[in-house]
């Protein structure tokens, strides 16, 4: 009930939640976590981890729609063919 009566507090809490979510779940954060887990679990070097991460991004780009993080990662030919379907 306190939040219903206080729009300023409601707005501040909503803004803080958006900032926290964008920090915790950004692609940069996810990539850092993935790389550290590879290194800790398998002793894989950063270079190999980056290769694996790039491969993962390319695999995601091959998914229906070919979009990752709002970017269309398909080749120009694939985009052209998809437009004709």
Image (cartoon, rainbow, N blue to C red):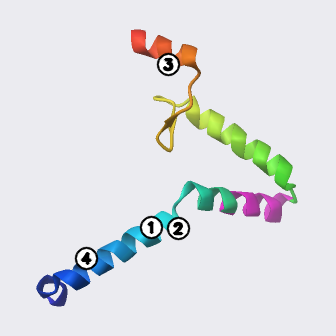
Q: Under tag 3, what secondary structure?
A: helix
- CA distance for labels 3 and 2: 32 Å
Q: Under tag 2, what secondary structure?
A: helix
Q: Residue 21 carries which label?
A: 1
- CA distance for labels 4 and 1: 15 Å
Q: Is residue 65 left or right of residue 12?
A: right
Residue 66 within the segment the image draws in magenta: no
Instruction: Please provide the residue range marked out in magenta.
Output: 33-42
Q: Mark 2 points at which residue?
A: 24
The first of marks 3 and 2 along the sequence is 2
- CA distance for labels 1 and 3: 32 Å
Q: Mark 3 points at which residue?
A: 79
Q: How crowded is mark 3: few (under 14 residues within 10 Å), some or many (20 or more)?
A: some
Q: Under tag 4, what secondary structure?
A: helix
Q: Residues within 10 Å of mark 1 (few under 14, many from 20)?
A: few
Quadrant of the drawing holding the N terminus: bottom left
User: Does the rendering let one see residue 53?
Assistant: yes
Q: How crowded is mark 2: few (under 14 residues within 10 Å), some or many (20 or more)?
A: few
Q: In this view, does 80 lie to the left or right of 53?
A: left
């Amino acid at each position: 009930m306190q939040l219903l009566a206080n729009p300023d507090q409601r707005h501040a809490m909503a803004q803080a939640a958006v900032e926290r979510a964008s920090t915790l779940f950004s692609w940069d954060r996810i990539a850092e976590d993935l790389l550290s887990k590879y290194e800790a679990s398998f002793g894989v070097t950063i270079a190999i981890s980056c290769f694996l991460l790039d491969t993962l991004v390319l695999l995601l780009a091959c998914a229906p729609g070919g979009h990752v993080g709002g970017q269309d990662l398909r080749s120009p030919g694939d985009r052209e063919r998809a437009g004709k379907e």
